[in-house]
């Protein structure tokens, strides 16, 4: 089944409309269920049996940590008085045309990520990993590294869009990743980082240690393709094909690999739980399945609750 899907697919994103402010974080009141609670229990009983449980996360899980999603003006970036949207900055085309500006934007976004701490939802997914061990996989679109900082293990965490804390060769001389140099002079405060302009010393540090070419952020850009060595493409599809339950958290279904993961799993009969403050295409899929449920509300509320219920079922 996996072979039927093209090995490489472009990352696509739909235009998004509603605004998402960075602060304050808005917690919706009581959780709303668009399916029945007994359905959730049935799905979790399935997760407590054999087979793989997959969590698929998007920017929404980190929103309560203070990292904006791509829905508002927060991500806009001005170069020579022209305003760029994230979907324009996060491209190979922009990097080829204005590499220093793209690096500056990433180092600002990295400062936002470094100021943030993992929240209750990240912590609950660590608990889930500890509960299920080899029966669990976490597929994340987030580049903020918060899952790893919360304690999710690298070997079961597929960062399918990369990690903003790492760089790699801009000329693809190797697939090796390097942590961003600690000597960079970029301020830690994200507002100061936004104003900061990279020095010659910074630029000299942002070079491939192997061949000396300009390095690039280790992030999958919107005009680039997924692959296995850097972005765990096949591993993600493999996990989806074997999943008995997929728990989707805070994603708008705008990128291609997550769509393949959910559709593959749903076609194979997996239970689908979609957690989101808003409706989205994955919630619609969950609603249509006999083994699906859409939980409308914040990740920080629903993910710990789902993990707690599953732990109780597993404990018997
Ligand atoms: P998105 O911005 O397109 O959608 C975010 C989703 O999260 C929306 O459906 C929204 O309703 C939901 N949401 C917002 N707050 C929530 C909360 N508290 N609880 C539950 N759900 C909540 O994000 P995406 O689907 O991940 O895709 C956008 C792309 O942007 C991805 O490629 C991703 O790599 C990148 N991105 C990453 C980060 C990050 O690393 N934190 C941040 C912004 C964008
Ligand atoms: Zn190189």
Image (cartoon, rainbow, N blue to C red):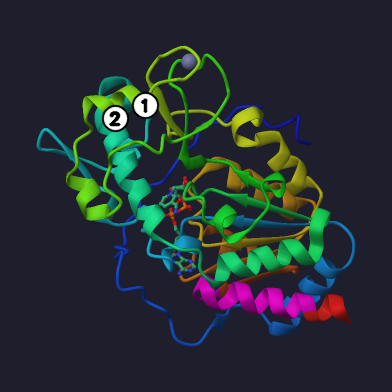
For this orientation, the residue located farthest to the bottom is 30
Residue 60 in the image: state x and y as whole percent: 47, 62
Above-or-below relation of 162 to 191: above
Residue depicted at 22% across the width and 43% down the height: 77
Marks 1 and 2: in contact by CB < 8 Å?
A: yes
Find disc 1 in the rendering and name its residue.
206
- Numbered label attached to residue 202: 2
Magenta stretch encompasses residue 305: yes
Q: CA distance from mark 2 to mark 1?
A: 6 Å
Residue depicted at 41% across the width and 46% down the height: 14
Question: Is residue 273 in sight in this rendering?
Answer: no
Residue 160 in the image: state x and y as whole percent: 58, 41
Residue 316 in the image: state x and y as whole percent: 89, 82
In the picture, residue 313 is in which quadrant?
A: bottom right
Q: Main secondary structure of the magenta part?
A: helix
Left/right placement of residue 259 relative to residue 312 reads left
Left/right placement of residue 302 relative to residue 215 reads right
Residue depicted at 40% across the width and 53% down the height: 113
* Few, some or many residues within 10 Å of mark 1 (<14, 14–19, 20+): many
Residue 109 in the image: state x and y as whole percent: 34, 47
For this orientation, the residue located farthest to the left is 81
In the picture, residue 114 is in which quadrant?
A: bottom left
- Numbered label attached to residue 302: none
Part of the protein shown in magenta: 296-311
């Amino acid at each position: 089944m996996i072979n039927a899907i093209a090995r490489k697919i472009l990352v696509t994103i739909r235009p998004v409309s509603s605004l998402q402010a960075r602060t304050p974080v808005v917690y919706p009141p009581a959780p709303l269920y668009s399916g029945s609670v007994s359905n959730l229990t049935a799905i979790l009983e399935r997760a407590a049996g054999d087979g793989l449980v997959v969590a698929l996360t998007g920017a929404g899980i980190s929103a309560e940590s203070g990292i904006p999603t791509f829905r508002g003006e927060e991500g806009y970036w001005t170069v020579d008085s022209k305003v760029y949207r994230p979907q324009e900055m996060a491209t190979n085309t922009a990097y080829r045309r204005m590499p220093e500006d793209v690096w500056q934007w990433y180092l600002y976004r990295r400062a936002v990520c470094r100021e943030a701490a993992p929240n209750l939802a990240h912590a609950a997914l660590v608990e889930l990993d500890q509960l299920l061990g080899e029966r669990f996989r976490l597929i994340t679109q987030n580049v903020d590294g918060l899952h790893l900082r919360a304690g999710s293990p690298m070997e079961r965490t597929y960062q399918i869009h990369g990690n903003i804390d790492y760089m790699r060769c801009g000329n693809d001389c190797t697939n090796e990743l390097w942590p961003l140099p600690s000597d960079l002079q970029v301020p830690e405060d994200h507002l100061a980082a936004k104003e900061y302009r990279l020095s010659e010393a910074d630029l000299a540090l942002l070079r491939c240690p192997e061949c000396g070419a300009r390095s690039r952020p280790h992030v999958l850009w919107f005009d680039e393709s997924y692959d296995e060595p850097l972005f765990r493409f096949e591993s993600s599809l493999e996990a989806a094909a074997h999943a008995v339950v997929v728990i989707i958290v805070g994603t708008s279904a705008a990128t291609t690999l997550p769509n393949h993961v959910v559709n593959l799993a749903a076609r194979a009969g997996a239970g689908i739980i979609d957690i989101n403050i808003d409706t989205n295409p994955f919630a619609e899929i969950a609603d249509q399945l006999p083994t699906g449920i859409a939980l409308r509300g914040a990740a920080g509320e629903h993910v710990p609750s789902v993990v707690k219920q599953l732990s109780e079922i597993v404990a018997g």
